[in-house]
Amino acid sequence: MAILNTPHSGAASVALPTASLAWRAPAKVRALALAASMWMAVGAATSAAPAQAAETSPTAVPVRVPVLVVKQRGTAAGVSLDGAVQARRQATVAAQVGGNVLALLVKAGDRVKAGQPLARLDDRDANAGLQRTDAGVAQAEAELRNARLAAERQRELRSKGFVSQAAVDTAETQLKAAQAGLAQASGARSQAALARGFATLVAPFDGVVLATHLDAGDLASPGRPVLTLYAPGALRAVVQVPASQAAQARAARQVQVQLPDGQWVTPTAVQALPVTDPISQTVEWRLDLAAATDTLSPGQSLRVRFDDPAPDAATSTAPLTVPQAAVLRRGELDAVYVQREQRFVLRAVRLGRQQGTDRVEVLAGLKPGERIATDAVRAGLAGALPGGEP
């Protein structure tokens, strides 16, 4: 028998048949013996490798994660809802006469002055109507002259005794009818001139074009919107408050609006409509914004917060809040790393409303005085240890 030794320390030895026996053994037996010896050699080498790596690798440095003490916040939870920017002064300019749009003189985003032309409509029909009324006025004036002369002749003949008083009365009546006819024709002419003026749409006030609803060539009919404009210096935040939270919103000691850039501002005026929408069961609140917010435009989203009524409302029932970074979110699971002696233990929690921009309310899972990791990602690393106050 021959002995095969592997080059690694502690490797197993495999006994192989001698040359004389191998000569007489079948080829299949010799192949199995050779494979077994190679497998034993590779196994010994792989088992020795981790031991050598452990001897040469440096000692791992533990990760120190700051911790904080969970406390009750002095501000109780209020109502925080999403809202939108709306113009306090906004007008939809619509056509008052029918006709094709010949030219749209402005586009969305243009600033306009009061009385500035915005669009021109086809005014051929209006011009024809004005010409008809001009002819009607001329006819009424002619009839009035004729009736006046006739009345004067009848009065002169009556003074000489050639006609009866009835003839004079008839002439006077015809004169009054002619005067009324002239007044009617003049009114019709004024109406036709006004209708022709409606063919040119003008801005009702200084503002910015918010949107255009028709293009050149479209047919405008009376009442159909052509464009919308608003006054940029007068904006407000509009929020729909659920009816179940309307009383809490009305009792709020302060209302604040978070602009799209993250800045919190206080509205100059607050108005809650006295009706509840029967479909959505919400109450509309309108919060006037200061004129300094010129960067806003109607339609932008913002956040509205109704703070709790009393500044001293923080009691033992005030909610616990933790930083957003201290919460580990994995699908439907919310958890924090709680310090237990010199290590961290992952504990599930139930979260509530967001408090401000960097904290969240904890409804269950934590107690005041417990210490948690300020960074849930670092606390989850292998070897992470509590590192003191942040």
Image: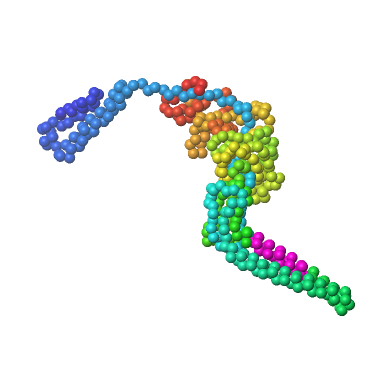
Name the one closer to the observer, 129 or 375. Answer: 129
Q: How is the image coloured?
A: rainbow
Q: Quadrant of residue 16?
A: top left
Say above or below: 201 vs 176: above
Q: Is residue 29 left or right of residue 276?
A: left
Query: Residue 49: image x %, image y %?
Result: 28, 27
Q: Is residue 286 magenta?
A: no
Residue bounds of the magenta highlight: 177-195
What is the x, y in percent for residue 94? Answer: 61, 56
Q: Is residue 28 above or below residue 106?
A: above
Q: Nearer the viewer, residue 44 or 196?
A: 196
**Which residue is most to the front?**
160
Residue at (43% x, 24% y) in the render? 63
Residue 363: quadrant of the picture:
top right
Residue 151 percent location from the top left of the image: 81, 72
Identify which residue is drawn at 15% across, 39% down.
27
Magenta part, dominant SS:
helix
Q: Horizontal placement of 22 versus 379: left or right?
A: left
Question: Residue at left 64%, top 65%?
Answer: 130
